[in-house]
Image (cartoon, rainbow, N blue to C red):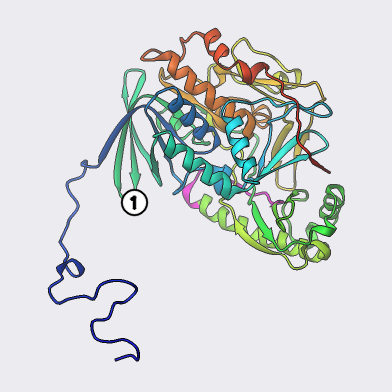
Amino acid sequence: MPVGVSNGAKRGGGMPAGNGDQSLTATRTVRRETAGTGREIGGDLCVLGAGIAGVATALEAAALGLRVVLVDGFPALGGQAVNSIVGTFCGLYSNRPDAYRFTYGLADRMLSDLDAEGALHWHETPVTPIVYYEEVALARWIERSVLEAGISVAVGAVLLDIRWDGRRIRSVDLATRHGTLSVSAAGFVDASGDAALAWEAGLECREPAAGPIFGSQQFVVEHLDETSLPSRNEMAARIAARAEEYGLVRHNGLAFYFPERGTAVINMTHVETPLDPVEASRKGIEGKDQADRVAAFLRSEFPGTFGDSRIRAYGFPGIRQTRWIRARHQITLDEVRTGTCYGDAIARTAWPIELHNRPEGLVWEPFGPDHVHYVPYSSLTPPGADNLIAVGRCIDGDPAALSSVRVMGPCIAMGAAAAHAFDLAGSGSVHQIDTAALQTRLSENLHRRDPLDRPMTRD
């Protein structure tokens, strides 16, 4: 017997196990029941995809009194905003020098709460202000908000089948590690990023015809020396000059430094993001290899800042554009460049054309200080279904146009628009709502112009 332990002594603060205590040893034998006996739940609205656009939709709809079911294939909420470690809220503000905010509502509460935690940092680029955030803080904010709103959640749930009733989706079947799940609802939102719901429903979708659009393997490095940070221009010049020597696929990129943390989010890779399950898995692993080479480059080329750094976390593969819906209206590059203000506009931004269409670089086309371009409601609605709306990066635009509206600011505004559209549609068609009434509800996201009043760091 070990010294200091007597027979019958408590272990770990618990009671000693007695010979007659069946709760510690009892088991039962189980077997899977007949197929088709999985869990069934229902609601007014089912949102497929829990990234920033899907979460915004779900929270806005719940605030309107709708019963919401939020589903995601990741084992956690937050989508790419959290799990791919994006690290920046982009597209929230107009361009310099007199920047003002475009998106309000849910964004007000999110920014206020995260700012109170010290989890935000405002930074002014040569084009527009962006907001850095701590992904862990955003993840917990999303989880707390969803729980407080009474939203039903199913994570790690992958779409299997869709059941129709005429032109309306009646329910979706999902596979989870805990068995199958069927969700019935009056309305459905495709916030999957890859138009997974529209695709599986047999609706027409679009893909880039000129080749893949590359994603990024984001990662966090820690143990930086913040007293010697290289400038954006210095880093860009060094990458361009030495990328091939280090085996870097992408010849440009950025580091987002969160002050007084000794950390940075690194965006310096380009990874293909195919929709084939085997190829996507292989490319995800290759993305981490790219990240390792970037980390080695940073340690060697900028030893004063990165000499003692190491990778703290790899994000899930970051996906920009893969497949999206064919809607009643496709946003075009010309409409973005000219700032077309649609009669059914529901969101606005001034984010540049940011098309990652080749391994080594991208198309980056910023706009002037007075530029604004918009997202029309008709780009969210596929014509083949009366109760389906898309939000986020799977709305309809040509590849260049879509690259300018798929960032977080307008994605939050799209979520608000979808929630209010379903509230207005009721049991009717999302194609026949009162657009003027919708825009009245979304007035702040179309017209409000609060100036930026935060201290910022600058490039």
The question of residue 272 being in magenta is answered with: yes
Q: Is residue 66 left or right of residue 22?
A: right
Magenta region: 266-278
Q: Nearer the viewer, residue 12 or 195?
A: 12
- Please give the name of the residue rendered at 17% of the width and 65% of the height, measured from the top-left corner: 27
Q: Is residue 402 magenta?
A: no
Viewer-proximal residue among 197 and 411 = 411
- Which of the image's four quarters has the N terminus? bottom left
Q: Position of residue 447 (x, y in %)?
A: 67, 16
Can residue 383 be seen from the camera position used here?
Answer: no
Q: Circle 1 is placed at which residue position?
A: 177
Amino acid carrying mark 1 in the image: Arg
In percent of width and height, residue 432 lies at 46, 9
Residue 28 in sight in this render: yes
Query: Quadrant of the image for the C terminus?
Result: top right
Q: Residue at the location (60% across, 46% down)?
A: 318
Compared across the picture, whether 31 is left or right of 81 comes to: left
Q: Is residue 262 above or below residue 149?
A: below
Secondary structure beneath disc 1?
Answer: loop
Mark 1 surroundings within 10 Å by alpha-carbon count, few (fewer than 14), some (14 through 19), many (20 or more):
few
